[in-house]
Image: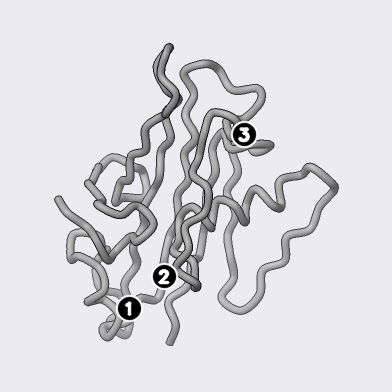
Amino acid sequence: MLVFVSEVTLSNLRSCRQVRVPLRRDVTVLAGENNAGKTTVITALRHLTESLDGRRGVGLDEDDVFDGAAEADQIRLAARLDEIGPSQAGTYREEFLEGVGVGGLRSSAWALTYTRPPVGKRRGSLLWSSTWDGTSPVSLRVPNKVGRCVGT
């Protein structure tokens, strides 16, 4: 059985103010009008997962913040991974895995929060958190390699 991303949520990213997208195991179709946020959902997935070719994409910046967002609003992206089997669980730290379900399958969730830079600074900050609600921050040495280069 293969692990899959079962859900992604986006807050304040480009054209998406608050969006939750459930994903199906085999096929998920994103359909909609121009500027509806289809590419933004794909972009969120790219920020939350490692690319197959190992290349890092461009990071988040102030231009990615939702147009109607208040000054204090942050970009928040979250992903949920389901059906992590016993043979794949070793890829993740135990603290990042939820309880064992039917057939030994487990789940994991993480979030990425981008905060705008303070006045006079050019770079915002990124925070990775290991829970679905984003309340358990962790330190990741290499942000694009969730589950591989993790430190506490």
Location of residue 149 (image quadrant): bottom left
Which class describes the residues within 10 Å of circle 3: few (<14), some (14-19), or many (20+)? some
For mark 3, give the secondary structure: strand
- Left or right position of 131 against 36: left
The one of 35 and 96 positioned closer to us in this rendering: 35
Do residues under tags 1 and 3 come within 8 Å of each other at their CB atoms? no
Identify which amino acid the numbered label 2 is placed on: Asp
Which comes before the other along the chain, label 2 or label 3? 3
Residue at position x 42%, y 76% in the image = 3
Q: In which quarter of the image is the N terminus?
A: bottom left
Separation (CA) of disc 1 from disc 3: 33 Å
Residue at the far left: name it.
152
Which residue carries the number 3 mark? 17
The one of 20 and 91 positioned closer to us in this rendering: 91
Separation (CA) of disc 2 from disc 3: 25 Å
- What x and y, as percent, mark residue 12? 57, 33
On screen, 49 above or below 59? below
Query: Closer to us: mark 1 or mark 3?
Result: 3
Identify which amino acid the numbered label 1 is placed on: Leu
Identify which amino acid the numbered label 3 is placed on: Arg
For mark 2, give the secondary structure: strand
Which comes before the other along the chain, label 1 or label 2? 2
Which comes before the other along the chain, label 1 or label 3? 3
Which residue carries the number 2 mark? 82
Which residue carries the number 1 mark? 105
